[in-house]
Image (cartoon, grey):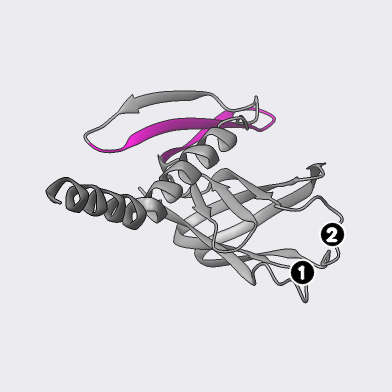
Amino acid sequence: MNSKLVAIIFVGIAVAMLPVIVKVVDQLYLSKLSSTYTTPPTLTMTTALTTKLSEATITSQSASSTTTASVTYTVIEPEAVSHLGADTLIVKPARVVANPGAIVPITITVRFKHAQPCPYASWQIELKPSGGIEVVSKSGSLVDRFDYVMNVKVRVNSSGQLQVVYLYGKGCPYGSKEVVTVVFEVK
């Protein structure tokens, strides 16, 4: 009788922990998938381990006719992920500390659960800058039937945020929107 009670309790705990286990496995899978995308070759990255954060210092060069200026920024959080519905929104980086005037490249990836084009193909990505953040350029395209990548360049004039909103196609039963906010702090 006692061994049956222990077995029932063990099974109950395993069933109760199932959502947590699934979420951990899902996050591991997403992090493995997102690591396949690399930064553009024009950036040089050096990684330094701090007490709790992994930082990457990136220097971008801007050349004028007579001198070369260097504007730097530091990546504090390498990425943010939103996965409330069927699709996944991944934004790299998620938190940046920059000098005033720095141009920071942002990579936005949407991983579709269903191959594109789908019956709800009116999906879109909205960029909502606030504070001293200015979107300088943006371009995006499907890299395959399941992945859309948008490259955005942002000028950091003062501290602010860039909210990235992925809106599911009209009528899509698998979700309504995914939202990630990129935080910019000026040194």
User: How many numbered marks have been drawn onto this rendered protein structure?
Assistant: 2
Using the rendered view, name the quadrant where residue 69 is placed: top right
Q: Which residues are magenta?
A: 52-75
Residue at the extreme front of the image, as rendered: 1
On the image, the x and y values in percent for residue 7 come to 24, 47
Depth check, front residue: 77 or 22: 22
Q: What residue is rendered at 64% in x and 59% in y?
A: 86
User: Could you tell which of marks 1 and 2 lies nearer the N-terminus?
Assistant: 2
Q: Mark 1 and 2 residues: CB-CB less than 8 Å, in contact?
A: yes
Observer-side mark, 1 or 2, equals 2
Q: Secondary structure at mark 2?
A: loop
Q: Give the residue type at disc 2.
A: Cys
Which residue is label 1 attached to? 169
Q: Secondary structure at mark 1?
A: loop
- 187 vs 39, left or right, is left
- 50 vs 35, left or right, is left
Q: Does the magenta segment cover residue 38?
A: no
Q: What residue is rendered at 18% in x and 53% in y?
A: 5
Q: What residue is rendered at 87% in x and 55% in y?
A: 117
Residue at the extreme bottom of the image, as rendered: 171
On the image, the x and y values in percent for residue 58 come to 48, 31
Using the image, determine if residue 127 lies above or below residue 102: below
| Secondary structure character of the magenta stretch overall | strand
